[in-house]
Image (cartoon, rainbow, N blue to C red):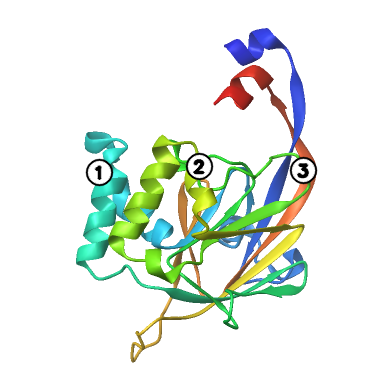
Amino acid sequence: MDYIVNREVTLVDTVRVLIDHEDEESLPTGDDRLNFMRHMMINSAMSMPAKVANEAIPMKKCCGKASYTIATLKEAIKCNVRQDLFNVTVDGKKVTREGKDDVGTVLLMPFNGKNTGAGMIINPFAVMNDGLVDLTFMSDERRMGLFGIADLLDKAAKKGGIQTYENAFTHVRGKSIRIEFYGSHKRKPKKGFGQQLLGIDGEDLRFSNFVKYDCVPANVEFLFNPNTYYND
């Protein structure tokens, strides 16, 4: 109601997400098309965050925000806290961890805006109308265990993104981001890795090989209250 009374609007970017397809021309028609293309408003997730979000779904009604904590513990018990391996390019340039030739991480999230589930701010630098997609991944291997992840996410939820200054994460941005999954650290299943979980604005999807994120600047118009947004 405050936004309506304020009577101010702003143009906001969206992010076109293509799943296992290089362009829209190769997409199927009909309802199946939605399995391979979406327009993202807030954020997306791969690796551990996508697994946790999927595990938390049936617990949300009874546990609320605590469902994410419970889901994280369940994933740890199942030994799913491990690095997934990605080839990442931003505007055609390869992005890697320092001293490596890939991105091996337990947390990888593209952002259009700064907020995510459970009130967390994992990337406080993301802006919804700057014409860019932001990418955040955990790059400090010393923090990739259960307790390290829990500590960083607790700060993201309760301290407004202050964990950003601990250098545990890498932040990059560009107009176009391509993320290719090619394996998991210390894990080689006989039948291959199969489809991977992909979260887009709270919805669970699947991908087999790669996902492309392309910013569509000033694509939608939103009611906007700058005092509320910037004070949060």
Q: What secondary structure is marked by label 1?
A: helix
Q: Is residue 220 left or right of residue 119?
A: right
Q: Nearer the viewer, residue 194 or 12?
A: 12
Task: Give the residue pinned by disc 1.
Answer: 59
Q: Earlier in the sequence, mark 2 or mark 1?
A: 1
Q: Is residue 43 left or right of residue 80?
A: right
Quarter residue 179 falls in = bottom right
Task: Give the residue pinned by disc 2.
Answer: 161
Q: What secondary structure is marked by label 2?
A: loop
Residue 184 on image: x %, y %: 41, 79
Amino acid type at mark 3: Asp
Task: Tell me the distance, in whole angstroms, between the alpha carbons under discs 3 and 2.
Answer: 20 Å
In the rendered image, which quarter contains the C terminus?
top right
Q: What secondary structure is marked by label 3?
A: loop
Which mark is on residue 130?
3
Answer above or below: position of 185 versus 217: below
